[in-house]
Image (cartoon, rainbow, N blue to C red):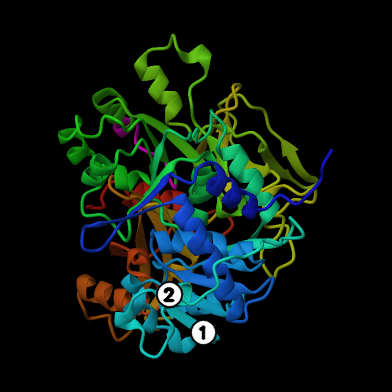
């Protein structure tokens, strides 16, 4: 058998040679569209590859992007890894402190900055060391090189030469259990195999006839792999820019057939999509991830709009897709209510992914049955799952001795292989598809001299899935002791705002004399939820 490296250059070449006429459409800030085909994209990627090389970027160097979902970002998705460098998409929703820490750890040598985030970038630019910054827009160029100038001045042909499929191609960061950023380094091989698996009929199922809209940001675990899966399949791609004012209008005007995003997006878009149901009749499937979509919303989309809802579950550590929820043939005879109940689960492992439920014992882990009732820690492995974090040795907290990833999720798996998340072992709150570390927030609150104890829990929220609630015990005598609860809450919010992005800040603070404890003296978060969740006004 022939044996040569599996690389992203093969995806790019296939898209260019076989699907050169397929379109990439980007919604621009002024409401107009930028359109070109795969052939034009390929030519620009070659020029960009030469330009980045001329800037002194070598194999293994990290190149960051601080950008939204645009055709320029898509070009960088291919140009950077195809020269042997490492694509590092920065999460624009993180705070300046977090971003500066991540950039320093990654040792990014070059950063491409979208004009939409140029002012935001300036808030932490002085805190990082980077050889060069390239701007997309001349308005924010200062004395820097411009993206389009870079491409125009570059030579037009580049010979891809990825000699080892195990070379790194991408670096994404995810929140850890203690709130510290953790990098995950993807290889050409892992992303190529992830692309093949994602394009299976019973997974994303993208075909040449599709028009794919990734609402999921391109800085979220490589946009769930859709930029690679879509081009390999030869689908048209629609990129929404920062955030389209009306998703329904965008879907209608571009003929989108498959779209992907977190439940919050689809909850907000539903009323307008329902009004324009005749305009969006090509839309056949929504890929939903980040958190569970409410059963009522699944029912509304499928019953009222005829749009199939497919839950996907995964992690940054998994490149990111692990499971996908589609009905089996034996489910056809079930009632609609029974079908939607199955669809509300996170789904079955996609080809190449293995799952197991485990209970920790003194001798390691005991594997638990798939009966749909037994709850255990969810552990995974696959050819595209990390076996360590970037610049860190594997630890027992995250990886088992037999090389399975400990997801930190508590789940059940039924006899048909459908997995359902029931709780989180890790102290993470999932809000609008983003991770919020309760431990990091608690640590920051305890820095205030008048805070004696602090616990942060995730409260169910109809719009965002979960929102953080802070339960605080103040010292008996302190500077804030004579202030109202609202005033104290404002003071603590200001303290958190200096360290964390806005969406991390708790919506409500509750001040108590004592925090419930478990038998071993730890804060009893389950008891706290029972006490405060029903009374919190959202």
- Assign the N terminus to one quadrant of the image: top right
Q: Secondary structure at mark 2?
A: helix
- Image quadrant assignment for residue 97: bottom left
Q: Residues within 10 Å of mark 2 (few under 14, many from 20)?
A: many
Q: Earlier in the sequence, mark 2 or mark 1?
A: 1
Q: Does residue 94 appear in this view? A: yes
In this view of the protein, which residue sits in the foreground, 247 or 317? 247
**Front disc: 2 or 1:** 2
Task: Residue at 62% x, 62% y: name it.
Answer: 82
Task: Residue at 18% x, 40% y: name it.
Answer: 272
Residue 183 x/y as whole percent: 60, 65
In this view of the protein, which residue sits in the foreground, 429 or 528? 429
Q: Secondary structure at mark 1?
A: strand
State the residue position of label 2.
147
Residue farthest to the top, as pictured = 333
Q: Which mark is residue 132?
A: 1
Residue 164 x/y as whole percent: 77, 58
In this view of the protein, which residue sits in the foreground, 180 or 164? 164
Q: Residues within 10 Å of mark 1 (few under 14, many from 20)?
A: some
Q: Does residue 376 appear in this view? A: no
Give the magenta part as a residue range: 290-297
Q: Main secondary structure of the magenta part?
A: loop
6 up-or-down from 305: above or below: below
Residue 211 x/y as whole percent: 38, 40
Q: Is residue 370 magenta?
A: no
In this view of the protein, which residue sits in the foreground, 273 or 429? 273
**Image check: 87 left or right of 445?**
right
- Image quadrant assignment for residue 445: bottom left
Q: Is residue 296 magenta?
A: yes
**Image check: 498 left or right of 103?**
left
């Amino acid at each position: 058998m022939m044996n040569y490296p599996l690389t992203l250059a093969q995806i790019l070449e296939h898209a260019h040679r076989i699907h050169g006429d397929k379109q990439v459409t980007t919604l621009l800030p002024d409401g107009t569209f930028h359109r070109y085909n795969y052939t034009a994209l390929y030519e620009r990627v070659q020029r960009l590859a030469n330009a980045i090389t001329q800037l002194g970027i070598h194999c293994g160097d990290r190149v960051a992007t601080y950008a939204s979902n645009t055709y320029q970002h898509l070009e960088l998705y291919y140009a950077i890894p195809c020269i042997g460098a490492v694509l590092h998409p920065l999460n624009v929703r993180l705070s300046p402190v977090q971003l500066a820490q991540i950039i320093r750890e990654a040792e990014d040598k070059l950063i491409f900055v979208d004009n939409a985030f140029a002012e935001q970038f300036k808030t932490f630019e002085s805190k990082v060391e980077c050889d060069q910054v390239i701007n997309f827009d001349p308005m924010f160029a200062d004395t820097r090189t411009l993206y389009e100038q870079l491409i125009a001045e570059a030579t037009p042909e580049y010979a891809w030469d990825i000699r080892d499929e195990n070379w790194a191609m991408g670096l994404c960061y995810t929140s850890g259990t203690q709130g510290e950023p953790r990098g995950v380094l993807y290889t050409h091989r892992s992303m190529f195999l992830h692309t093949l698996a994602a394009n299976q009929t019973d997974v994303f199922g993208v075909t040449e006839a599709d028009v794919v809209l990734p609402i999921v940001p391109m800085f979220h675990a490589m946009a769930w792999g859709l930029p690679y899966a879509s081009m390999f399949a030869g689908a048209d791609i629609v990129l929404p820019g920062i955030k389209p004012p009306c998703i329904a209008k965008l879907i209608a005007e571009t003929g989108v057939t498959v779209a992907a995003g977190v439940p919050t997006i689809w909850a907000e878009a539903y009323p307008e999509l329902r009004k324009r149901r005749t305009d969006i009749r090509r839309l056949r499937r929504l890929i939903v991830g980040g958190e569970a979509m409410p059963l009522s919303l699944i029912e509304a989309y499928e019953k009222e709009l005829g749009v199939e809802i497919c839950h996907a579950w995964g992690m940054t550590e998994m490149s990111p897709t692990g499971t996908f929820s589609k009905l089996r043939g034996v489910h056809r005879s079930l009632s609609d209510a029974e079908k939607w109940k199955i669809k509300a689960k996170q789904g079955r492992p996609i080809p190449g992914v293995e799952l197991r439920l485990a209970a920790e014992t003194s001798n390691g882990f005991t594997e638990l049955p798939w009966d749909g009732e037994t709850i255990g820690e969810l552990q995974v492995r696959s050819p595209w799952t990390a076996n360590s974090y970037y610049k860190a040795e594997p630890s027992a907290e995250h990886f088992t001795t037999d090389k399975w990833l400990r997801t930190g999720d508590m789940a059940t798996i039924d006899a048909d292989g459908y997995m359902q998340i029931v709780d989180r072992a890790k102290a993470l709150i999932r809000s609008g598809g983003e991770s919020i570390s309760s431990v990091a927030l608690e640590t920051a609150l305890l820095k205030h001299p008048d805070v004696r104890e602090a616990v942060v829990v995730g409260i169910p929220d109809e719009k965002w899935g979960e929102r953080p609630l802070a339960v605080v015990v103040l010292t008996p005598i302190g500077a804030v002791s004579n202030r109202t609860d609202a005033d104290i809450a404002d003071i603590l919010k200001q303290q958190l705002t200096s360290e964390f992005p806005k969406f991390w800040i708790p919506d409500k603070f509750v001040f108590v004399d004592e925090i419930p404890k478990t038998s071993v003296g730890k804060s009893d978060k389950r008891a706290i939820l029972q006490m405060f969740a029903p009374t919190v006004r959202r």
